[in-house]
Image (cartoon, grey):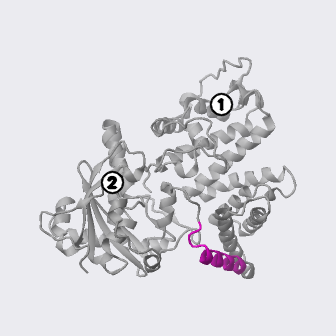
Amino acid sequence: MSPTSEPIHAPRTHLAGLDILPGPLPSLASVRTDAVEAKKMRERPENYGDTVLLYRNAPSVNANTLPRHLRLALIFSNNLPNLFPFSYLAQEDDVPEDVVDASIWALSLFIQIFEECPEAVLRAAGHLTPDIDYQEHRYLMLLYARKKMTLRLLSADRAQEAIPHGKSMVDEELTRGKEMWLQNPDPFRIYGEVLVRSRTDDKEAAKALRRALLGIESANWPSNFFPPLIRTRVFLSRALRNIGLDGEAKTHESWLATWFRKNPRLMPEREQTTKAEERIIKACRTCGARDPLATLSRCNSCKHIYYCSRACQKANWSHHKVECRERAEALKKIELMSRTDPDGAERAADWLSWCNSNHDAMQIGMIHALGLHREPQRGRTHIVFKQVEYVPTATKLKHKFRVLVCGVFRIKEVLRDLETVMRLDRGEGQEYVDSVFPEMHEMVPFAHLSFGNGVTAWLGSGVTSTAALRNFPYDPDWRKKFNVGVPPEPMVLMSGAKDVEHIF
């Protein structure tokens, strides 16, 4: 997902598995404004060292005697009224990636405040209301904050940094009574996953995940609590393999194989978020390995492509380098544009996000359009062209651009059209097309070109597997899933190249 991608719906409030709505979350625009200010604060904290903390509702409370790092944490939380509550309350999958780093920083200060500030300061600063129990509320606030911090760091591929927060959750639970994993298995499950993904302590990970599994399978949890159950068994089997307990690991792997065979479509009925959609296609660009059965790292330059190892990244570089450079340049251009043309920057950011998301006009729809179910080899010989228009008022990312016209063409017949749209020199089109096809011999690649007024033409690509083509039958109405309302019309090219969607 692009660093400036939006959730496909308005961000939702979510705390530790409980959907609550204490009031509307701050708008993403206000959160982004705070994130810009937060960057300045982090770079020059000395500018705020002389700020005096005064609480009108508690004038006798003097927070100015606190250690410098706590005073700064309180000052920053007070001066960023949108970023801090958003970071704490927003559901994980609804935090856009360009806000993730700032939200992690805000959560780290939030945790510091609750861990180290005295009760009087917490109440004076408004973090605790007068009628609430201090000990219990402090426990819950820290539990939720540490959980969100841990999950957010995991989503940002920063598992090593998540270890102390995961451990703090577990340590706190262990102080509250015996066998607390039966009442609250989540901290143990998350901590175990952190240890496995950071490759730190598989023995401790197995211990935490065994406890989490006991809790999840106990009578205290509903029978449909299967997503955490599956993740627990997956990471437990990895930890067990890593410490040589292959027999126990095989037991969990057999259970998983049986479960997926019997329940191929038994997943929660909910609209997918941008991050959830990203996870569907998140795989090593070279070998196709997927999380959680492999630890994936994102390319540092384009922040979009994933690899499972340095060897895979090196092997794929000759194919990825053009896309990588262009995406990195696009991110830099958006950042510069935001200073002089905010509307243009927003359109460019939406375009980058739209082009890199897993919606129908970029992924599944392309598979149906190209007829890969019938002839998988068409993925390398045919291409989908799409002309779009910007819809800035759309609330969902996949509807930010409406596909006006589209068509399926033989690549060799539209190379000049492609070069014209992408402003390439004659003869460069084939090189660009070749550059987007990954070297994944067991996968079926495909390419598509998106363009429109006010946006830079985008030559995108994707992959699917022959197994996926078998499991998801061809949909002749694929065009109807692109837009809200009217589907796109057939495309007519100036070159006269024919649409060959139904010509095999």
Give the percent coordinates (x, y) of residue 43: 51, 38
The residue that disc 2 covers is 329
Give the percent coordinates (x, y) of residue 364: 40, 67
Q: Residue at x 50, y 54 (%)?
A: 273
Q: Earlier in the sequence, mark 2 or mark 1?
A: 1
- The C terminus sits in image quarter: bottom left
Residue range (magenta)? 249-266
Horizontal side of residue 207 vs 94, given as left or right: right
Q: Residue at x 70, y 54 (%)?
A: 166
Give the percent coordinates (x, y) of residue 32: 47, 39
- The N terminus sits in image quarter: bottom left
Image quadrant in which you'd find residue 441: bottom left
Q: Quick check: 58 above or below 465?
A: above
Label 1: how many Cα within 10 Å (few below 14, some 14–19, many 20+):
many
Image quadrant in which you'd find residue 232: bottom right
Which mark, residue 188? none
